[in-house]
Image (tube, coloured by chain):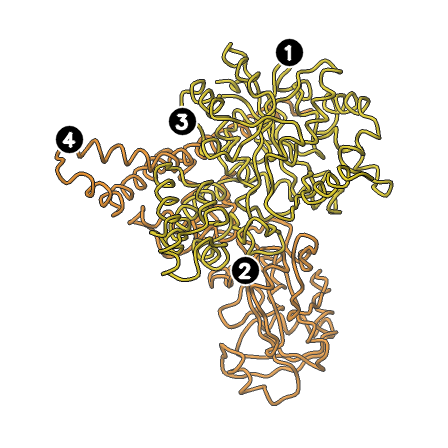
Chain colours: A yellow, B orange
Amino acid sequence: MDKNEEKQREEEREQVVSPWEVSSSGKIDYDKLIDKFGCQRLDQSLVDRVQRLTGRPPHVFLRRGVFFAHRDLNDILDAYEKGEKFYLYTGRGPSSEALHLGHLVPFMFTKYLQDAFKVPLVIQLTDDEKCMWKNLSVEESQRLARENAKDIIACGFDVTKTFIFSDFDYVGGAFYKNMVKVAKCVTYNKVVGIFGFTGEDHIGKVSFPPVQAVPSFPSSFPHLFSGKDHLRCLIPCAIDQDPYFRMTRDVAPRIGYHKPALIESSFFPALQGETGKMSASDPNSALYVTDSAKAIKNKINKYAFSGGQESVELHRKLGANLEVDIPVKYLSFFLEDDAELEHIKKEYGAGGMLTGEVKQRLAQVLTELVERHQVARAAVTDEMVDAFMAVRPLPNMFD
Amino acid sequence: MAYSKDQLLARLKDLQIEFSQYEHPAVMTVEAQAKYVGNIGGGLSKNLFLKDKKHRFYIVSALADTKVDMKVLSQRLGLGKGGLRMAPEETMLEILKVPLGSVTPFALVNESARDVALLLDKGFKAQERCFFHPLSNDMSISLNTNDLDKFLKSIGRDPAYVDLEANPAVGKDQPPDLAAFVPSGSTVLPDLPDPASAVQSAGGSHVNANNNCKAATEKAIKPAKDVQNVKDKSAKAVNPSSSFTDAEKFVEEILDRISAKLLSEKLFMQTKEGNIAQQGQELGNEIANRLRKCCYPELKNLATIFKNTAYTQGFHAGKASSLTQCPRT
């Protein structure tokens, strides 16, 4: 084993990003990730282009670089400029009932895309995946899927343009036909290479990837897109989902479909800092959509990792370390006003503003967000979930 | 047709259930009860009548000394934290047909209580005899748990004893251990005047309140709505749902929020700072712009909920109408 190989192995060990594991010995290096995965950086010119085409300010996640990578976004925009529409595809693995702010990020962004481009959306709930990977019962994973659907609906999706489906309910028919077409194009060795399966993994896992791949193809939804076989697909997702879609993009031309385009986000940091892990079993590591204003304030004050200095005097002198400060990072996700964020970063970085003030502003912003979500969530009935999940045409989906 | 104390006692005798009865002045607490029957051997019971956010009811019957933590119980039932509260007195009368101070497992003899879940303290099993009220708190009867079981089985109940003090972890890999006790049938609230039933019977508008959501909705609506029926908490939970099905209420909700923002200190403070010199129309414009900016996401949210709710009702009406047109399907 020569020195270069050794070094490469070591580097690979330090940072692991896959659909089932995200970990790193230090901060996640997104540049390295983009290189490794082979996607493109989402630069300012693309953000400006989106603004021009949609006629509205770009979403805060675009402005702040939360969604920072893409594949073929330019092609989607080229086609859109010519009047060719596309549809959105995103999803959630319903592994737990409790949703935290990080879970909402892709949905908030997808809602913006739906509103800005006026295009339809399909949302996949991979209850079968969680049943297999988390060893949940079929009933439990279906129940979680419906519960999660309510929080997703609460993000404000338009029922006349949105189709939510759970794998257990929907797989079959045209969807399954596409699954088989995809499966035929991916060898066992390839899927092991992409996802790291071993001889001990059960065959359910090995045959799952096509399930997540085929919503990228419009023919999987004959009740929505019949006759529109060449409709393009844009997939907003977190960057750890990239392997599924690399595989999909590899297969698509071989079965006569457009490659889906992707727009990818970075990871939402845990309350305790970049190296901390957000975990469903530690309620203090994340802010949940069910948290009260009081709980949010407390968690931020007690657990949010601060980049401020040890003492007020030291802080006034040296300023805060914005690289590791979590409240500022969270504000960059959720504070709409660019000018205010700049002001906070400047003052806090120079020592003029104290950690307490930043945390207070963050608590305000998040409380507003969470309360709005809770109002919307309270209004989601089982009947509404049924309506979103019904296999029905969406005649106004491009309006 | 509510069971009376005498009817219950007669029934117990019919079932050949052995019990001892003790009359005493009406007692509202276990401590008071103890004054009269505390010295006779046997475990005194405390009985809680609880309800969850989905209007399902539970009787938790435990030894007086057993610690019952509602938060833990709520999680073990799979209701999340804070999903359980004491049921209001009206429901005690309507469903259990007993007044305050008389909650007892025996109340399940009433038809109206058929969907009420029963959790029994496993501590009862260790006692020779246990005391319960026979539908009235001016008497206590003591009996062995086997006899209690006999009674429960006679009314079609499967007696199950639970370690109420246990606090097992509930997380994504450990499902709530008492989830099976949650009633599955929808609770029928007969002729209840309280708004909770209005919520259930307004087909499709049933508010699926989330944990802490009621607190949040109260907060969100409180500053906006000055004139409101503050009495019952569930009345507040009803407002979001009717705000989204009734155009009048929807518009009122929007105007309330706009007024609240308009009157909020922050808006004026910001406006004042920058515009001391401005007057009249300029000031008006300034305020209008700021108002737009800060109200837009909130109002958009409300409008989307309104649209989705209307669509949902239409969708289900459409489904039902096509079903009635093809009766042979």
Compared to A274, does A186 lie above or below? above
Q: What amino acid does circle 1 point to?
A: Gly
Q: Are marks 1 and 4 in contact (CB under 8 Å)?
A: no
Identify the disc placed on residue B281: 4
Label 1, secondary structure: give it.
loop
Q: Which residue is mark 1?
A: A227
Which residue is located at x 65 percent, y 58 percent? B170
Residue A150 drawn at (x, y percent): 56, 40
The type of residue carrying mark 2 is Leu
> What chain letter is assigned to the residue under label 4?
B
- Residue closer to the observer: A9 or A174: A9
Q: Position of residue B211 (x, y in %)?
A: 52, 52
Q: Which residue is mark 3?
A: A57
Most foreground residue, B132 or A219: A219
Is mark 4 in CB contact (under 8 Å) with mark 2?
no
Dot 3 and dot 2 within a common chain: no
- Give the residue type at disc 3: Pro
Q: Residues within 10 Å of mark 2 (few under 14, many from 20)?
A: many
Q: Nearer the viewer, mark 3 or mark 2?
A: 3
Side (left or right) of B238 relative to A196: left
Q: Secondary structure at mark 3?
A: loop
